Amino acid sequence: RIHDVSYIGDIWEYKQIGLFGFVLPCIQYCNTNIVGSGWPIQLQEKFIDSVGCNVMWNLSKISISVQEPHVRRNSNGFKGGEISERVFSSALAGCLVICDCPDAIRQVFGEEDSRWFPALDQIDEFHDFIKFALSNPSDPYIIQCVENQQKIVLAKHTYGVRIKKILQE
């Protein structure tokens, strides 16, 4: 895998607080690939199609998923109930998915499965975990996260599984 960390997504004023804190600092300490428009840095690509996304995830060790402000915790409490599709597609590609919104991960994956999806809402802890994962790829927890993320998504979160569940209800 040639990229340490990858992120796909556009940036605009509504999203920039989270993205500036969780995504941009990665550039300072690891090989980071960002695709999207509106970023204050020069990017190789501003748009890739779904095939390009899958290729990118297959070339990346870690996928960062930063939730939009309406999903994140604020003074009124947790507002979300959604996570980005990149969580599912990058987990299927074998990336270690790291998210910034523990509540969203717990709500989507449940208490038991969410333990395999590292979700840290404090910027320093988020980056410390990325640095740890990159420096310790053979750590048993890191290996288990990657393996279990992929297994959980395949078993419970594909379109086929969801359609079957809807039809049974």
Image: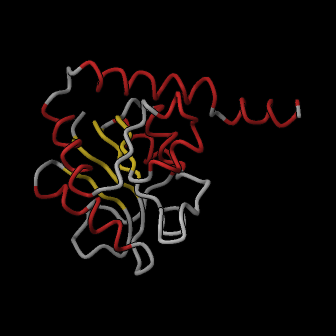
In the image, taking residue 78 as reference, residue 56 lies left or right, namely: left
Taking the spot 69% from the left edge, 36% from the top edge, the residue there is 159
38 up-or-down from 88: above or below: below
What residue is at 45 percent from the left and 78 percent from the top? 14
In this view, the residue in front, 163 or 112, is 112
Q: Position of residue 59 (x, y in %)?
A: 30, 37
State the colouring used for the structure image.
secondary structure
Q: As drawn, is 144 to the left or to the right of 1?
A: right
Observer-nearest residue: 118 or 39? Answer: 118
Q: Nearer the viewer, residue 115 or 41?
A: 115
Q: Point out the image quarter for the N terminus.
A: top left
Q: Position of residue 24 (x, y in %)?
A: 23, 63
Which of the image's four quarters has the C terminus?
top right
Quarter where residue 146 is shown: top left
Q: Residue at x 29, y 59 (%)?
A: 22
* Residue at x-position 49% and y-position 54%: 49
